[in-house]
Amino acid sequence: MEMNFTVIASGSSGNCYFIESNGHYIFVDAGATLTSIKKAIGKNNLDSGKSVSLFITHEHTDHISGILPLVSCFNPKVYTSKETARALIAKGVDSNIVYGIDANITYDFTDFALMPFDTIHDAVQPFGFRFDFGGNIFSIATDFGIITDEIFKAIEESNILLVESNYEEELLKKNKKYPDYLKRRILSKEGHLSNKDAFYLLAELSKRKLQRCFLGHVSENNNDYDILEKYADAADNMFNVQTSVLRQKKSKLFNI
């Protein structure tokens, strides 16, 4: 089944993704302005005949800053963890459209199945999401400091993966603008995933079913796109996984 995948925003300053598949429109996170969302997906209004869903990974600002305008414009049902649902409602999202869901349970929608999974991050109850479009499995896993057995198990059958590749460790350690406590937070198990750890994950998943990968949620201050492109080229050449680097504030459409 062919899908259109639009990266609206991916990085420290904002995260928002859009999937169009058969009879459904899917947003993952809402860390972008309504103007940038409309521009990226090329539509002022989505086809009223299709259902719209919004899946929220966690409540940090770079993932929900645009949620109220998005909800007002597109009228989606919002799915997230139960604790994150409470956080969204406290920020003004209508409780009637927010649904708290559980990790490691498969939810059947009209044209796809969804399985949320727990991640480790300094948020109230963060999730990653695994979407199954008729056997074509697309997982989105960002904002975690270590690859737990649970995360690996959730995404190991993925054909397509969007994974965080947040920082290059040496650049982070040399960054004089970041205080030590912030560096420790990023490096911790509740922080973010490094380039090397993301590359290690690709190596392991390439032994299974992974064919396509997106490296996202890139730090503006502790990473380098030239370095990331080298990782992506290595993944292509060594693992036979087609790998793309997602750049901050640059929307892009992929047919997958």
Image (spheres, rainbow, N blue to C red):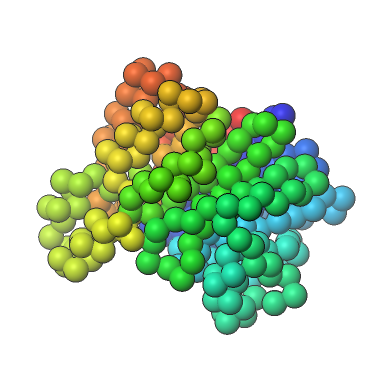
The quadrant of the picture occupied by the C terminus is top right
Residues 131 and 224: in front is: 131
Give the answer, above or below, for where 157 lies relative to 20. Answer: above
Please give the name of the residue rendered at 79% of the width and 53% of the height, measured from the top-left corner: 51
**Would residue 159 appear left or right of 100 to someone viewing this image?**
left
Decide: is 245 above or below 108.
Answer: above
Question: Hey, which quadrant is residue 229 in on the image?
Answer: top left
**Viewport quadrant of the N terminus:** top right
Q: Answer whether residue 112 is visible to the viewer in this image.
A: yes
Taking the image as shown, residue 124 lies to the left or right of residue 24, namely left
Question: In the image, residue 152 lies at what x, y percent?
Answer: 44, 42
Q: Nearer the viewer, residue 38 or 246?
A: 246
Q: Position of residue 134 (x, y in %)?
A: 72, 33
* Residue drawn at 41 percent across, 39 percent down: 215
**Horizontal arrangement in the rendering, residue 174 relative to residue 94 (left or right):** left
Q: Is residue 255 left or right of residue 123?
A: right
Nearer to me, 254 or 22: 22
Where is residue 114 drawn, in percent x and y? 66, 48
Q: Position of residue 2 (x, y in %)?
A: 69, 30
Residue 164 in view of the camera: no
